[in-house]
């Protein structure tokens, strides 16, 4: 079977690293993002997944041309706010990009996966699903990913399709540096507080995605794997 992976946000960070590694394994890789990948071997479908119509158009365009075997929803936004400043619009926007967009996209790819009796569906979740200050909308929607993935895993297992979540902790990407200044004392202090003593790199997260992507790994579904340097084990260290 020819393997074709659709990765949202494959133009940089974790998605970009995963795209490179899947290309090296002879996958066809399609990026859905607002900006194209710099890699000439990645197929770009430009779309803003905060726009429901744009997500639907991307799903239709890709499903018409490609037999998608792997769907990795990696794109995400944080939008941090304390409770007093959080708004329903925050929840609506992050629900669209974290939950509604992957639903729309998977609905486009699912007929081919079911026909092939094979598929891999993956989410980039977050350790923040367990709770982080200033993350009302982000934590809520990332936690929602876990529930949705477990439901999809149950529905799709009879069709040979697995669904899993990789939940990163603090990883050195643009999203992280939008919150914590690059090279700052705050960044260094956070690294010290993690049990492993360092921040994550995109390669740490793509390692986990590659495990779930492997066609031979068909007996693991509905799971959330925290790749967080131990941050999900507990917050109190004596």
Image: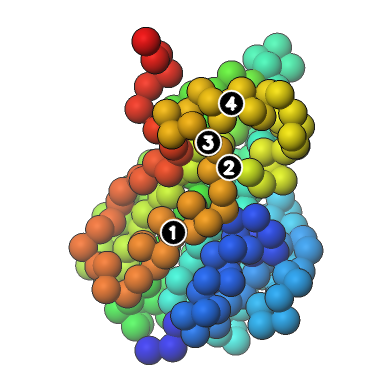
- Residue placed under numbered mark 2 in the picture: 171
Please tell me which of labels 4 and 2 falls first in the chain.
Answer: 2
Q: CA distance from mark 4 to mark 2?
A: 11 Å
> Nearest the camera: 196 or 119?
196
Please tell me which of labels 3 and 2 falls first in the chain.
Answer: 2
Please tell me which of labels 2 and 1 falls first in the chain.
Answer: 2
Q: CA distance from mark 4 to mark 3?
A: 8 Å
**Against 32, is 151 above or below?**
above
Please tell me which of labels 4 and 1 falls first in the chain.
Answer: 4
Q: Tell me which residue sits at (59%, 63%) in the image.
A: 17
- Residue placed under numbered mark 3 in the picture: 198
Q: Position of residue 142 (x, y in %)?
A: 51, 38
Which of pointers 1 and 3 indicates the residue nearer the eye? Answer: 3
Where on the picture, by quarter, is residue 236?
top left
Q: How many marks?
A: 4
Q: Tell me which residue sits at (56%, 49%) in the image.
A: 201
For label 4, the SS is helix
Please tell me which of labels 4 and 3 falls first in the chain.
Answer: 4
Q: Position of residue 89 (x, y in %)?
A: 72, 32
Q: CA distance from mark 2 to mark 1?
A: 13 Å
- Residue placed under numbered mark 1 in the picture: 207
Q: CA distance from mark 3 to mark 2?
A: 9 Å
User: Is residue 43 shown to the viewer in this render?
Assistant: no
């Amino acid at each position: 079977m020819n393997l074709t992976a659709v990765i949202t946000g494959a133009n940089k960070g974790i998605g970009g690293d995963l795209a490179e590694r899947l290309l090296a394994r002879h996958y066809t890789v399609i990026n859905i993002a607002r900006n194209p990948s710099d890699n000439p071997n990645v197929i770009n479908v430009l779309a803003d997944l905060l726009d429901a119509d744009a997500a639907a158009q991307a799903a239709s365009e890709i499903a018409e041309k490609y037999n998608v075997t792997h769907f990795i929803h990696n794109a995400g936004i944080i939008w941090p706010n304390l409770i007093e400043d959080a708004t329903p619009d925050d929840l609506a926007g992050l629900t669209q990009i974290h939950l509604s967009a992957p639903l729309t996209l998977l609905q486009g790819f699912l007929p081919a996966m079911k026909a092939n009796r094979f598929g891999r569906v993956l989410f980039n979740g977050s350790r923040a699903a367990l709770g982080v200050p200033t993350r009302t909308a982000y934590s809520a929607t990332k936690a929602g990913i876990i529930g949705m993935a477990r439901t999809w895993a149950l529905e799709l297992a009879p069709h040979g399709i697995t669904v899993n979540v990789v939940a990163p902790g603090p990883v050195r990407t643009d999203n992280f540096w939008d919150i914590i200044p690059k090279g700052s004392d705050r960044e260094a202090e956070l690294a010290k507080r993690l049990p492993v003593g360092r921040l994550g790199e995109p390669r740490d997260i793509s390692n986990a995605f590659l495990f779930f992507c492997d066609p031979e790994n068909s007996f693991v579904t509905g799971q959330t794997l925290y790749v967080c340097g131990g941050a999900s084990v507990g917050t109190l260290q004596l």
